[in-house]
Image: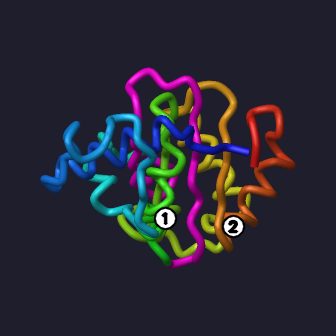
Amino acid sequence: VMSVGQDRRAEIARALRAKRGHVSGPETAPRDAPVRESACMCPPVLQLLTMDERTIPIDCGSIYVRWWGSGGPVETVVLLHGGPGISERYMEPVVPFLDNGRRRIVSFDRRGTGRSRCDSDDPAHFGLDAQAADLTRVIDELAAGPVHLLGHSWGGILVMDYAGRHGDRLASI
């Protein structure tokens, strides 16, 4: 089970409060006081994390990939969105909860969705074999060591299929 340590959550919450101008000084609360977190602090927290993006060429077009986290990560988490036809952007809110300062969190639009392209009408270009090949390509380009896969809906199906094909490349699903 991947979880963000209490120290990292407190650090993110303090940075968020500081960005909003709500810095707790010694007169209001000690620095190590427990941090109250809102139910969803995702969009502002994402602004505090470094995000990079690029495209990766594939057989019928390109895959649009974004990632957050350190330049030299110890481990990688790959997010796989639902769909088909839905962009990966709706998975952004989970990124701050996966970040522990040592992980790279990778998310990408699967072929033919969002900002990724696949200029083909051939159904084989959109099947599980092609999707698994794209995931391998993303992992080869951006991952450090065995990866953690987190999938939602159709992304969960792809995670299970990929685990059957390449379980040796995975740390967890």
Give the image's coloring scheme.
rainbow
Q: Residues within 10 Å of mark 2 (few under 14, many from 20)?
A: few
Q: Residue at x 24, y 52 (%)?
A: 17
Q: Secondary structure at mark 1?
A: helix
Q: Residue at x 66, y 36 (%)?
A: 147
**Residue sitting nearer the eye, 2 or 111:** 2
Q: Residue at x 59, y 50 (%)?
A: 134
Residue 69, percent from left and from top: 41, 36
Residue 129 in picture, x, y percent from top left: 72, 57
Image location (x, y in percent) of residue 34: 45, 46
Q: Which residue is mark 1?
A: 91
* 132 relative to 45 in the view: left or right: right
Which quarter of the picture shows residue 139? top right
* Image position of 59 (left or right of 55): right
Q: Which mark is residue 132?
A: none
**Visible residue check, residue 52:** no
Q: Per the image, is 79 magenta?
A: yes
In the drawing, does residue 41 fall left or right of residue 131? left
Residue at image mark 2:
127
**Relative to 79, residue 99 above or below:** above
In this picture, residue 17 sits left or right of residue 11 = left
- Magenta stretch bounds: 57-85
